Amino acid sequence: MSHEASEQGSGPAQRSVEVGVGLGILVFGAIVVWGSVSAGIGWGAEGPKAGFFPFYVGVVIVAASLFNLASALKIAPSVLFAEWSQLRQVLSVIIPTTVYVAAIPWLGLYVASFLLIAGFMRWLGKYGWGIIAAVSIGVPLLAYFAFEKWFLVPLPKGPLEDLLGL
């Protein structure tokens, strides 16, 4: 039996995943409520204090997560959320995208975009180097002209843009 075949039909239970996500969102909502109370949720002479609207948003988040948690607990524990091989495919997109976002402050948006597009096209799409070069260079160039020149919106730049004087 191969490693791939042994993972068929196994994976995390939907109930566990939904409870984990529900708890994470519950904690997030509690942090929003706590921070709002710290900022002030009352009504002052100038109008609502800084935490007024975020407090109610946090309350709605907490209530919705409690509803989702109650719904998740009704799911049979044997229901599969996804197979491990399916989750591996999702991670093959999430991990490079996370690295891309983390690299933007150091490399700039355009170089990081070039690397992400080229990597995805080669690794996942199996495209040839000619089309990879055309798309991975063309898309950041188009974004540069659209945002920096036409709309006058500066985007994060890195050392290459500094070297080129852009």
Image (tube, rainbow, N blue to C red):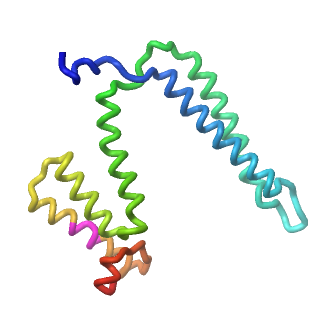
Picture coordinates of residue 5 (x, y %)?
22, 19
State whether the magenta stretch is mostly helix, strand or loop.
helix
Indicate yes or no whether the magenta region holds residue 155. no
Q: Is residue 91 above or below residue 130?
A: above
Quadrant housing the N terminus: top left
What residue is at 30 percent from the left and 68 percent from the top?
A: 111
Q: Nearer the viewer, residue 159 or 144?
A: 159
Q: Nearer the viewer, residue 51 or 1?
A: 1
Is residue 146 something that shows in the picture? yes
Q: Is residue 150 above or below residue 5?
A: below
Q: Which residues are magenta?
A: 137-142
What residue is at 88 percent from the left and 62 percent from the top?
A: 44
Picture coordinates of residue 139 (x, y %)?
25, 66
Q: Find the residue positioned furthest to the bottom.
A: 165
What residue is at 77 percent from the left and 60 percent from the top?
A: 50
**Quarter-wise, where is residue 52 in the image?**
bottom right
Indicate yes or no whether the magenta region holds residue 139. yes
Q: Is residue 10 above or below residue 61?
A: above
Q: Is residue 148 left or right of residue 3?
A: right
Picture coordinates of residue 159 (x, y %)?
34, 77
Q: Nearer the viewer, residue 106 or 101?
A: 106
